[in-house]
Amino acid sequence: MKRIDERFPRKERLQGKRNFDRVYKDGAVYRTQHIVLFCLRDNVEGRKAAFVTSKRLGKAVRRNRIRRRLREAYRRFRAGLPERVHLVFVARSGVAELEWEGLLGEMGTVLLRAGLKKS
């Protein structure tokens, strides 16, 4: 049986201020109660994603845990996403209190609103 690679490799990470600014400026915005998604599809190379948490969400340990959970939820949906898209997920207040199933539901909803996931 072939093993599916579920890592989040460096080549799929959106990095650099210039890339973030481009996604924020030119990308579309989709919101749920706990997640904001900035999505840029035009003229981009590869599928890249980033996860952002504000200091308002808590201290570093809490913010890092939120980002880890968002990355894992994204990995669950990654295989069904288009190959040429840049995504920035921004965590909103209350995301840390969500149960795992709730977080997966929010991630699915925001990707559905963006037209990146089939219903």
Image: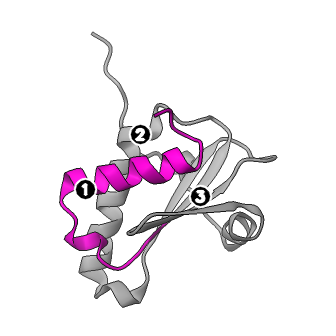
Q: Is residue 3 magenta?
A: no
- Residue 94: image location, x then y, percent: 29, 76
Q: Identify the mark at residue 77; answer none if there is no mark.
A: 2
Residue 37 vs 86, above or below: the answer is below
Residue 7 seen anywhere in this rendered image of the structure: no
Q: Are marks 1 and 2 in contact (CB under 8 Å)?
A: no
Q: Over which residues does the magenta segment extend?
A: 90-119
Which corner quadrant holds the N terminus?
top left
Q: Position of residue 10 (x, y in %)?
A: 51, 50
Quarter location, residue 39: bottom right
Colouring scheme, one of rainbow, by chain, secondary structure, one colour: one colour
User: Mark 1 = which residue?
Assistant: 102
Query: Looking at the image, is 19 positioned above or below residue 82?
Result: below
Q: Which amino acid lies under the numbered mark 2 shown in the image of this protein?
A: Phe
Name the residue: 40% across, 52% down.
Answer: 107
Q: Residue at x 75, y 70 (%)?
A: 25
- The local secondary structure at tag 2 comes to helix
Crowd rating for badge 3 (residues with CA inside 10 Å; few <14, some 14–19, many 20+): some
Q: Amino acid at mark 1?
A: Gly
> Which sits earlier in the primary sequence, circle 1 or circle 2?
2
The answer to which of 73 and 34 lies nearer the viewer is 34
Distance CA(mark 1)–CA(mark 2)? 14 Å
Q: Of label 2 and label 3, which has the lower sequence position?
A: 3
Is there a contact, CB below 8 Å, between mark 1 and mark 3? no
Mark 1 and mark 3: Cα distance apart in space:
25 Å
Q: Mark 3 is on which residue type?
A: Leu
Q: Residues within 10 Å of mark 2 (few under 14, many from 20)?
A: some
- Residue under pointer 3: 14
Residue 76 relative to residue 84: left or right: left
